[in-house]
Amino acid sequence: MSVKGDKWRGGWNREYESNFDKIFRKEKMSTTPEQYLEMWLSEQIPTSEWMRLLEWRPDIKEVYEKHLEEKKK
């Protein structure tokens, strides 16, 4: 009796590889400092979490400080 999944249905291709990477290789999906800043400005990140991010990632803090400087001008 045949059941779903008992037969080879094809091979590995670029589309499957891309989907595999998106699902299982999270390091490729890192969020940029600019994206974090946009989320903070649109109030998607709570203040306590934002403070933790500023301490944890110096690159986010640098982008945020640049934003503050431009805002002062």
Image (cartoon, rainbow, N blue to C red):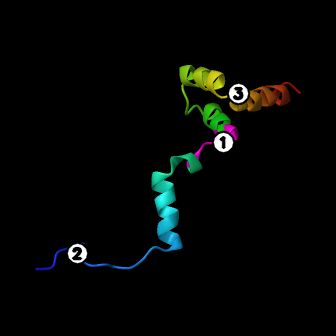
Residue type indicated by callout 3: Pro
At 73% from the left and 29% from the top, the residue drawn is 64
For the residues carrying marks 2 and 1, which lies nearer the camera in this image? 2
Q: Which residue is mark 3?
A: 58
**Residue named by callout 1:** 32
> What numbered label is drawn on residue 65?
none
What is the crowding at mark 3: few (fewer than 14 residues within 10 Å), some, or many (at least 20)?
few
Quarter of the picture containing the N terminus is bottom left
Q: Is residue 38 above or below residue 53?
A: below
Q: Nearer the viewer, mark 3 or mark 2?
A: 2
Q: Is residue 10 left or right of residue 22?
A: left
- Which residue of the protein is positioned furthest toward the right in this rendering? 73
Residue 62's x, y, as percent? 76, 29
Q: Is residue 42 above or below residue 15?
A: above
Question: Which one is in front in this view, the residue at disc 3 or the one at disc 1?
Answer: 3
Residue pointed to by mark 2: 6
Quadrant holding the C terminus: top right
> Nearer the N terminus, badge 2 or badge 1?
2
Callout 1: SS: loop
Q: How many marks?
A: 3
Residue at x-position 61% and y-position 26%: 53
- How much space separates mark 3 and mark 2, taking CA atoms? 50 Å
Segment colored magenta: 29-35
Q: Are marks 3 and 1 in contact (CB under 8 Å)?
A: no
Q: Residues within 10 Å of mark 1 (few under 14, many from 20)?
A: few
